[in-house]
Image (cartoon, helix red, strand yellow):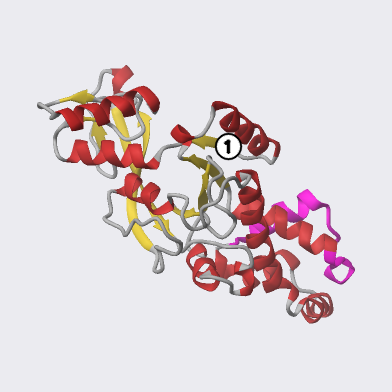
Amino acid sequence: MEIGVVGKPNVGKSTFFAAATLVDVQIANYPFTTIEANIGVSYATAEHPCKELNCKPNPQNYQYKNGIALIPIKMIDVAGLVPGAHEGRGLGNKFLDNLRMASALIHVVDATGRTDAEGQPTDYHDPVEDIEFLEREIDYWVYGILRKNWEKFAKRIKMQGLKLSKAIADQLAGIGVSEDDVLDAMHRVNLSDDPTKWSEEELFNFVQELRKINKPIIIAANKADAASDEEIKRLIREGEKRGYIVVPTSAAAELTLRKAAKAGYIDYIPGSGDFRVLKPLNKKQKHGLELIREKVL
């Protein structure tokens, strides 16, 4: 599985990617820091069965630490996205090309609301709008691929008696769409087997359902430590209304913990709720780690 880390510029997307993978990427407080896709390996954690079965683990395709299995997952940090990307705005074409490789997406949003739609600093911008605009960009991108020659395509399928689901899957094979994805989306929208009868609205509804199936999204509400509790709760509620899991995160804090663990200062499993100090820390290091423990973990 390959997971794409996506979002508009300047929301901490590359910091999130670096924290997840420890790949040394360019991190800066300005738009379009990421131009070429960064690729690395992160780890999903799960309690290992041997912890309860009292057996000896034999890790081959994963890592094992303190009763936890760390399962490798390929991650792609793609170029920042701005409104109009499906029309080529910003680094839109590069973003969408990178997106083809991903089986699922982590959408990093600024939970503080201090970056506008273009990724520029602002007093307040509703992060819920960012959730919606990513949906729109992907939907219009896929819709554009299908809509371009839809009439001819639909007539050819009908005249030649081709299997509709397979024909659409072949058309969208470049973005990883399978025939099962197409069949599932068609079933959800309750579409006719005759594509010449599909309205533009039905075609767009089909694309929306296809995106939910083929590119499932989880929301990382980044900079959560700097956002109010009320704003985080609202973001979680609004995300759930739209069918998303919203996870409050602090990429900067996680990156600090990962680097401290790599340097041998602490024992820390990525994503866990605490860490253990292994060797003496100076005053600044101790203060920084205790602040993370108090405010983030």
Q: Is residue 172 visible?
A: no
Q: Please identify the dominant SS of the magenta region.
A: helix
**Picture quarter with the C terminus:** top left
Is 208 displayed left or right of 274 in the figure?
Answer: right
Q: Can residue 162 be seen in this view?
A: yes
What residue type is disc 1 on?
A: Ile
Image coordinates of residue 259 in percent, x first then y, are 23, 41
Residue depicted at x 66% and y 49%: 129
| Magenta-drawn stretch contains 189 | yes
Q: Is residue 293 above or below residue 41?
A: above
Is 87 displayed left or right of 286 in the figure?
Answer: right
| Magenta-drawn stretch contains 36 | no
Q: Which residue is denoted by mark 1 in the rendering?
A: 245
Image coordinates of residue 109 in percent, x first then y, are 53, 46
Residue depicted at x 64% and y 32%: 234
Report the span colored magenta: 177-200
Q: Residues within 10 Å of mark 1 (few under 14, many from 20)?
A: some
